[in-house]
Amino acid sequence: MMELTQFDSLLHRFTHRSQAIDRDTSLMELMQALKGEQLDTLPLPGQGSTLERWRALARVAACDLSLAKLYEGHTDALAILAECGAAQHAGNGIWGVWGAEPPDARAYIVERDGERVCLQGRKAWCSGALHINRALLTAWENDQPQLVAIELPHPSQRIQAEHWQAVGMAASVSVAIEFDHSPGLAIGGPGQYLSRPGFWHGGAGIAACWYGAAEALADYLRENCRKPRRDPHADAHLGAVDAALYGARAALHECATWIDRHPQADASFEVQRTRAQVEQAVDQVIQHVGRALGATPFCRSSHFARLSADLPVYLRQSHAERDLAELGRQLAGMPAGAWQL
């Protein structure tokens, strides 16, 4: 069992009394502090303590989602390296994972000498590229995605940050990078990044981050409802929030248990339905908390305001109806009884 009070103690040192991360403290400094206290060494998914791993992710997300974006990417990279038999490359850096493949941005392997490769092309949605010093990214070779480890910065890399205009998740700075014969190291085999069981385990970890942020917002409503002067409308909103979070929490528990029992199985269905459940719950929490509390916390609590701005953006790591359509497609091919109690 991980000692989550370690997270609370460390994160408290970097917060204002309003519980927002002090922006005079860089996210990189926070990441280095987490790493220095070995709080980036999480249980690997599928090894019996998946829920403990997700609890740590949720803890960081409840504090600050830009920090959680970096932390989740770093811890996911360490898990990927371990799963691909490349843990020896983890080193002392802060990692990111860049697997997005939009049609207008693709990196290619143009030369290979054993594990050593050279990259050409462009990679989009490189979250945290201004903060981290190592990354795992997908690059294409012979029509297959190959995972490649790179070091940052490098003279052959050109960061394109001019299009980043975000308000929510602004501090995560997700940029594009152009590669011009840039060196890298192939990790695992061709196609392994997508085919390995841990691909979907990591997707559920992102849902744990969504949940942690929503739980933090819900606590503001719970504290408001503890005041002596009761508001039945706020109580009703709190009841709706509890129902939503209870369902999402149960889904995360069940998914973690399933992954630990079937660590090498395809977890796509279990993870996609869990992500859908958590996303729906988070949407409900955002709506009910905002309607119950009005404008005051948006204007007077930097922590609440930042979470409220960041969470809808982070939640869009879900692909909405496209993900639901894939979930429905899988469910339609299953025998009856998928919902039996």
Image (cartoon, grey):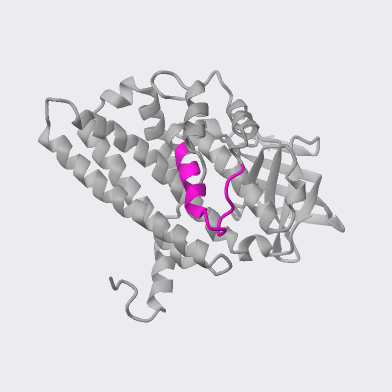
Q: Nearer the viewer, residue 108 or 247?
A: 247
Residue depicted at x 32% and y 26%: 298
Q: Is residue 62 magenta?
A: no
Q: In the image as oriented, which residue stretches furthest toward the right? A: 113
Q: Is residue 222 left or right of residue 278?
A: left
Q: Residue at x 53, y 60 (%)?
A: 200
Q: Nearer the viewer, residue 283 or 223?
A: 223
Magenta span? 41-59
Q: Give how far across and how far down residue 75 sits, in percent.
A: 60, 45
Residue 143: horizontal and vertical position, in percent? 71, 66
Q: Is residue 267 left or right of residue 277?
A: right
Q: How many marks?
A: 0
Decide if residue 322 is in sight here.
Answer: no
**Whole-percent x, y for residue 306 in the image:** 41, 29
Examine the structure image and report whether residue 58 is included in the region drawn in magenta.
yes
Residue 145 can be seen in this image? yes
Q: Quadrant of residue 307?
A: top left
In the drawing, does residue 302 fall left or right of residue 28? left
Q: Residue at x 75, y 44 (%)?
A: 150
| Quadrant, the C terminus | bottom left
Residue 74 found in image quarter? top right
Q: Position of residue 42 (x, y in %)?
A: 58, 45
Side (left or right) of 10 relative to 193: left
Q: In terms of depth relative to the viewer, which is nearer, 56 or 172?
A: 56
Residue, far bottom? 335
